[in-house]
Image (cartoon, grey):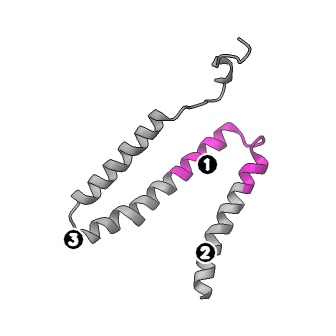
Amino acid sequence: MNAIIIGILLPLLGTMLGSAFVFFMKKEIPDRMQKTLLGFASGVMVAASVWSLLIPSIEMADERVLPAAIGFLAGITFLLLIDELTPHLHNGALSALPSASS
């Protein structure tokens, strides 16, 4: 039971600590450091998806790659579709929006 609690609390505390740094220091983090940290986080997520999702799915399919590849491509397609359908507001784009008074 202790291992379960530690297994839940450790990622929780790491996430809370990381988000607290971003929340309290977002105005003070240099642009280059922010991009570096974003790149690092992206690399961690890619590694997590490969080692925790793709490789086990290939092993579960008796070393056949096709089911995992189809799921991977379906996920990519879904994310691209959502990206295309949802409105975006980028930095500096507020001036490009029509004003409510006109």
Badge 3: residue crowd in 10 Å (few <14, some 14–19, many ≥20): few
Given this view, does label 2 or label 1 mark the residue nearer the observer? 2
Q: Which residue is mark 1?
A: 37
Going from the N terminus, do you reach mark 2 or mark 1 first? 2
Q: Which residue is mark 2?
A: 8
Q: Quadrant of the N terminus?
A: bottom right
Point 58% across, 82% down: residue: 4
Given this view, does label 1 or label 3 mark the residue nearer the observer? 3
Point 78% across, 42% down: residue: 28
Q: Are marks 1 and 3 in contact (CB under 8 Å)?
A: no
What's the residue type where badge 2 is placed? Ile
Q: CA distance from mark 2 to mark 1?
A: 24 Å
Relative to 27, does residue 2 appear above or below in the rendering? below
Residue 61 figure quarter: bottom left
What's the residue type where badge 3 is placed? Asp
Q: How many marks?
A: 3
In the foreground, 89 or 43: 89
Q: Main secondary structure of the magenta part?
A: helix
Q: Position of residue 46 (x, y in %)?
A: 45, 54
Label 2 residue SS: helix
Q: CA distance from mark 1 to mark 3?
A: 37 Å
Drawn side of residue 8 relative to residue 60, left or right = right
Q: Which residue is mark 3?
A: 62
Q: Please state the extent of the stretch shown in magenta in the rendering.
A: 20-42
